[in-house]
Amino acid sequence: MFKKILIANRGEIAVRVMRTCREMGVASVGVYSDADRPAPHVRYADEVYNIGPPPASESYLNISKIIDVARRSGAEAIHPGYGFLAENADFAEACREADFPFVGPSPETLRAAGDKQGARATMAAAGIPVIPGSDPALRGDEDIAKAAAEIGWPVMIKAAAGGGGKGMRICARAEDFGELLKQARGEAESAFGDDTVYVEKCIVKPRHVEFQILADAQGNVVHLFERECSIQRRHQKLIEESPSPVLDGELRARMAEAAVTAARASNYTNAGTIEFLLDADRNFYFLEVNARLQVEHPVTELVTGVDLVKEQLRIAAGEPLRFAQKDIKHRGAAIECRISAEDPANNFYPATGTISRLRLPSGPGVRFDGGIAQGYEVPIYYDPLIAKLVAWAECRPLAIERMHRALNEFVLDGVATTIPFHRWVMASDAFREGDFDTSFVEEYFRPEAARVEDLEKAAAVLCTLLTHFREGAAPAAGAPSRDGALAVDPWRLAARREGVGSE
């Protein structure tokens, strides 16, 4: 096993990887931009190095700077986290050339997985169902438009080099195709430096179900069951859970077998995710390979008891998997809410500011993964995801109640976040009944739902202020005030402001 690794990332995922390193007795090397100098991951690392100005292109995406820090620090391997360089084949290649094991798939696998059309062809050859789509050789707008018409409306325009909802548009009518194709190309070029797109049949109101896999260099591949990821907005996941409320044993087994087959067909090593779309008739189709650790990996860890980061490090060090498929058991239910600095009452517009007050939820079955602290200033330069809240219980209804309780305990002031949205989802009948698909947010959520909570919070603050002026003006606790009433004990008044210990 490695004695020291560099984590080429920031925020909550950097802290999460460092925690496992500490448990394993592995020293962690952190990196940070000028904007992240006071960030929690900088304080948590065993040693840290500055890698440049705030823009990611000059710091977290600068391959040469990260390799240089790895050399200077004496790190023995590099963990990319997720996002930034995690699926960058050139970065994995640079790590290999510099003799630093990359904690993830090989550069060849990353290139194959990043080629969405090539990946589709690989899966089809392996007998895995794929969504009907255009020929990879098509590049011209007219040829792609013709292919879209032959596939049949609606179609999905997708960036060939990317994922995460970037460069993606749904088109339901031929007359809209030209403009949407232009938009998709422009976004793809901006996000990935490649405007190549393709089209595939749009599955109407699908569910998004993914399977976690682990594969070692000795050829062993296992799955760690599924995660339901259908609560999303603009193809960005917001809430994930396991098990999926829609899968039965037979369908789960078929999809799991397809996921393992997909991993083998891709020559996959390390941790990854095989993603599927599930239609209303319970037909599933390959969507893509996410060749990295996923944001939602804690869900799988809670229902299987497997530390995925530990397994990543062991595999990268050349060790075989420590368990076979029969050894992996699914227990209970887990739900994850992504806490982002976005305002759900304002169309999820990104928010910045300083966290003026932070009180984290806790108690049985509650896990918090975060890269924030009270007084932390949320920067404008990076993804708005700042934390993840995960709840586990013996069954889905209890997991929902536990998550709802934890969200109600969660206090984060100074920055708008998605916490009010998550509270609304946990109370939603459709979510509780498991009756939803990827259009859930567009169909059911209204900004007023988040504003109601803001009004309630304002009313609570006003009541606290009125109580303070009415009860806190006496000269001393227990002494009579001007009107003859006894003053309120200031300790009890402070507790009342926090919502505990009140009469």
Image (cartoon, rainbow, N blue to C red):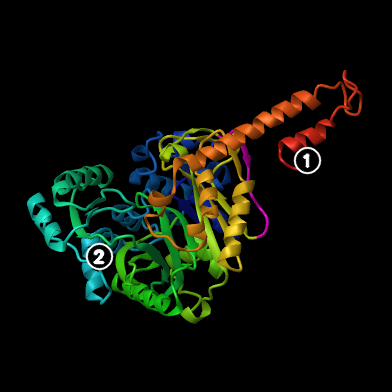
Q: Is residue 495 above or below residue 475?
A: below
The x and y percentages for residue 200 are 21, 60
Q: Which numbered disc covers residue 119?
A: 2
Q: Would you say residue 25 is visible in this rendering? A: no
Q: Is residue 267 left or right of residue 412?
A: left
Q: Nearer the viewer, residue 18 or 302?
A: 302
Of the two numbered discs 2 and 1 on the same chain, state the one appearing first in sequence: 2
The x and y percentages for residue 208 are 38, 62
What span is colored magenta in the figure? 355-364
Mark count = 2
Which circle, 2 or 1, is nearer the viewer? 1
Q: Which numbered disc covers residue 23?
A: none
Q: Would you say residue 423 is visible in this rendering? A: yes
Q: Is residue 371 above or below residue 390?
A: above
Q: Is residue 122 left or right of residue 290?
A: left
Give residue 95's quadrant in the image.
bottom left
Q: Is the C terminus in the top left, top right, bottom left or bottom right quadrant?
A: top right
Magenta span: helix, strand or loop, mainly? loop
Q: Which residue is mark 1?
A: 502
Q: Nearer the viewer, residue 408 or 264?
A: 408
Q: Is residue 453 above or below residue 134?
A: above
Give residue 99's quadrant in the image.
bottom left
The x and y percentages for residue 344 are 46, 41
Was residue 362 drawn as part of the magenta stretch in this picture?
yes
The x and y percentages for residue 491 are 81, 34
Q: Residue at x 33, y 76 (%)?
A: 261
Cβ atoms at labels 2 and 1 below 8 Å apart: no
Was residue 330 drawn as part of the magenta stretch in this picture?
no
Q: At label 1, which amino acid type do we have?
A: Ser
Alpha carbons under labels 2 and 1: distance apart:
59 Å
Crowdedness near tag 1: few (<14), some (14–19) or many (≥20) residues, C-alpha within 10 Å: few
